Amino acid sequence: MTDPHVDRDVLDTLRDVMEENYPDLLDTFLTDSESRLQELQATADAEKLSEVAHSLKGSASNMGAVRLAELCQALESDARHKSPAEIVKLVAEISLEFDGVRPVYESERQHTHTH
Amino acid sequence: MQAQEPLTILIAEDSAADRLLLSTIVRRQGHEVLAAANGAEAVELFRQQQPQLVLMDAMMPVMDGFEAARQIKLLAGETLVPIIFLTSLSESEALVRCLEAGGDDFLAKPYNQIILAAKIKAMDRLRRLQDTVLQQRDLIAKHHDYLLNEQRVAKAVFDKVAHSGCLSAPNIRYLQSPYALFNGDLLLAAYTPAGDMHVLLGDFTGHGLPAAVGAMPLAEVFYGMTAKGYGLAETLREMNAKLKRILPVDMFCCATLLCLSSLRRSVEVWNGGMPDGYLHRLATGERVPLKARHLPLGVLSAQAFDDSTEVHAMAVDDRVFLLSDGVIDTSDANDQLFGVERLQQVFAANLEPDRLFEDIEQALRDFRGEARDDVSMVEVSLLAPAQLKPTAPVYSDSGQSCPLDWSVSFEFRGATLKRFNPLPYLLQLLLEVHGLRGQSGALYSVLAELYSNALEHGVLGLDSSLKRDAAGFARYYEQRNTRLEALQDGYVRVHLQVTPQEQGGCLVIRVEDSGKGFDVARVMERPLENVRLSGRGVSLVRQLGRNASWSDEGRSARVEFFWEVQA
């Protein structure tokens, strides 16, 4: 069963590519994403929202967080047309999704530590 | 499959995670990585380290990828530094922006290692191709400079050879590109000792140095022989033999050679392979074509070579016009040739003879849409007697070592008269007497006149009154050729006697022929004038020499020259 939230094949490839730097990548991703989320929550400017969502989308897709990337895409393309209420709702969804996948990456980090 | 060479690759990506991931992927593929977090850092890193390839994120703070790409391309100059944009931009407009900003390709996120490796390989191939092209371009430029320099040197040498000519004489107008020599075009002009003018318009096969290098020996022969007083026929034979000997088999020189004589009011023509020249008679408006009746110089062996010329009467206002095939061969956008008919149209439409060159150039421009620089044209008229070149100044010396008291006699008979021109030798002999050098022009003219009278009117029995009009003129020279070909017997004798006098010396010339003579008394009665075409020899001799007299019923002519030595 393929996980709609995190693509395990991507993680496998990343682990393979990064070798001993895999934990660093995971850390960087988590830290990066947290600060992006904060930016999303802090701003109402449509253009800024688009940019940040775009950035988060990029790294999310690289890290296999498929659903997270989709949500960011939605925010990026429609930020101009959505009402403030809709934006808040979407940002909350993004935040929720991130909280949902964070344990996966943390677990990955634990995993490599024990090797 | 060839292994990819390691490159130095610049990665510009603002997302730390993505930057880390991409750097690792690229390092694993064997390359060295420079990492920047925004456009400004990227440009600075590029300036410092000159990486060979750039992976550029489109959206970055401080300076975005598009601007960074533009700046990097500027810094790279002629060198190709491929820029691959990293983007999750999906709209085609955004992709177009990438390419317009100077991007060479793009890579979508999420990063696919295999695709990335393939793109790096492809871009590197392009980069190396560009490098090769630039290297070869520089090499070609260097060789081109060498060639140009060689040509410069060749031209400088040739100009020294050619400078002894008289192209700047008032009776010559010409148009020639400064690099005509390297198109094979040649234009020479020189005075004969008698004050006649030889003109040569030539066209060597080929271009560049091979075309130019034949011009030098040809010019030497032309100037050398003309200065010594040789006629067209001997000069042509010598030029042909020389070119035949030294040029490769497939090279030759088309040429038209003219001898213009103000004294005889005639132009003698030899055309080997050049386009028709034209003798424009102002009085009647007629343009007589001077057609190519011979092969170019350097083709035929000495035995097969034909040195026969055409002679036309020429009045003071008449003009001879010669042109190279650059005019006729000018083609337009549809590869149609300008051709002889269009040239004739320009002639017909030309109202001011002095503007003929401009009219032709304009017609060529109109036809082709631009000017050509390999067109050579020359227009020659007769020098008015007043314009004849003054004789060279004489250096006075005591003449200690020159012959002052001597005589010599020659007899030239049938077979020799047919093919030998003794005049250059006789003149050279006389010029050993220093005191005579100042009169070499007059000496040559008188000798030539007496000799040709002796040969043509005396031995060949030609009637000089035939030359009174243009048609008769042509007939006269046809008869001359025919009778000369058939000549068996007859002679011309030349006696030269030099004796010293108190302050200088005296030269007595006597010329005798085996002909029938003429009515001396009647001819001497005529006043000295230069207007008529026929019977002018006698006037000339009487004017240029002293104490001219004819005896033995006109078969023997005698004339004296004197000189004084300045103290």
Image (tube, rainbow, N blue to C red):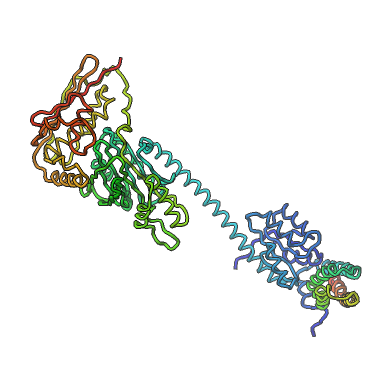
Measured as percent of width and height from the top left, residue B64 is found at 77, 61
Query: In this view, which residue lies farthest toward the bottom?
Result: A1
**A65 over B330 or under it: above or below:** below
Q: Residue at x 14, y 27 (%)?
A: B549
B348 vs B404, nearest the viewer:
B348
Q: Is residue A93 left or right of residue B210?
A: right
B479 vs A74, nearest the viewer:
B479
Measured as percent of width and height from the top left, residue B423 is found at 21, 34
Is residue B210 at all visible to an observer of this figure?
Answer: no
Is residue B52 at all visible to an observer of this figure?
Answer: yes
Measured as percent of width and height from the top left, residue B91 is found at 73, 73
B552 vs B22, nearest the viewer:
B552
**B186 over B25 or under it: above or below:** above
Q: Is residue B205 left or right of residue A16?
A: left
B139 vs B300, nearest the viewer:
B300
What quarter of the picture does the N terminus of chain B occupy? bottom right
Q: Is residue B64 left or right of residue B190?
A: right
Q: Is residue B505 left or right of residue B397?
A: left
**B315 over B287 or under it: above or below:** above
- Total count of labels: 0
**B294 over B59 or under it: above or below:** above
Locate residue B540: give its quadrant.
top left
Measured as percent of width and height from the top left, residue B246 is found at 31, 45
Locate residue A58: give its quadrant.
bottom right
What quarter of the picture does the C terminus of chain B occupy? top left
